[in-house]
Image (spheres, grey):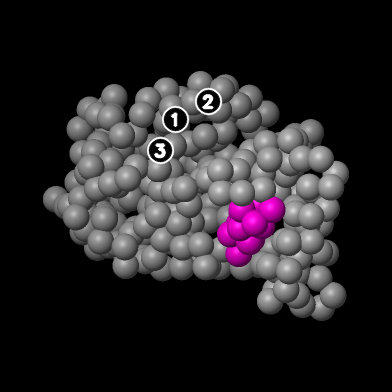
Amino acid sequence: MANDPPSDEPPPAPFGVPELLELVAGARRVLDVGCGSGRLTVALARAVAEVTGMDTSADRLAHAVRLAERAGVQLTLVEADMEEPLPFTDASFDAVTSRLSLMIPRDAVPTLRELGRVLEPRGRIATVVWAALPENPWFDAPREAVRAVLGDERASFARAFGRLGSPRDAERAHRAAGFDDVEGRLLREQVVRADAAEHWRLLATENGHFRRIDAALGEHERRALVVELDARLAPYHADGGLELPRTLVLVTGRRPE
């Protein structure tokens, strides 16, 4: 994740956040599952009366506290695992959101079923996950460049990327968990970079996986990796730079009466 800018202005909304906000507009009590450092959670708190963020990482929740303080909003933050029974009573929320966390469980259906339990009848769920790797060369090409230059072991991170990575698969999981009115669609944007070297540099700044790899590189390895990445990004050259597709799967549904 990118570091928050040293400013009182809210950071730019991450990809998918505006759509999630629109889908839960009008809800009074919202649970943000797998909230991480709180960027979606804080955005929700600007628009919704009561927002609860939940994550397994105490460090990320501490970051969410600081982000909320800077934004001047109130949050309830809970350290808990979404793959375990949730620490909330039935029908505690009007809406549930999840940005990128549903890729983590190997079987998302039990997690989704538990999210349905804490929703009130006709409450809405809105989730996004990364689409399959071919839809996301901004991530896939650098990881495959790591594999080619540094070997399979160094490229074994983020194996869950792209899980539930098509509207059909994601819709199927939500329906199996008991949700009605399930609809899925793709969200697309373009990441614009000057060249492969800039893309690698920004990934190493913004993404923990690539940051750890870059920190262990010698200059010869880094040059070789950028050369490999440049070759893999050749199909995305446009107007003297790079335009790299990024794609999310967005799914909505409602708890039955």
Residue that appears at 80% across and 48% down: 222
Q: Which residues are magenta?
A: 137-149
49 above or below 169?
Answer: above
Say which mark, if any, is on residue 55.
1
Residue that appears at 28% across and 30% down: 84
**Residue 122 coordinates in the image, percent (x, y):** 22, 51
**Residue 91 coordinates in the image, percent (x, y):** 22, 36
Say which mark, if any, is on residue 211.
none
10 above or below 22?
Answer: above
* Quarter of the image where the N terminus is located: top right
Main secondary-structure element of the magenta-colored stretch = helix
Say which mark, if any, is on residue 33.
3
Task: In this rendered view, identify the residue nearer to me: 76 or 218.
Answer: 218
Residue linked to disc 2: 61
Nearer the N terminus, badge 1 or badge 3? Answer: 3
The magenta stretch spans residue 79: no
Q: CA distance from mark 2 to mark 1?
A: 7 Å
Q: Is residue 52 left or right of residue 1?
A: left
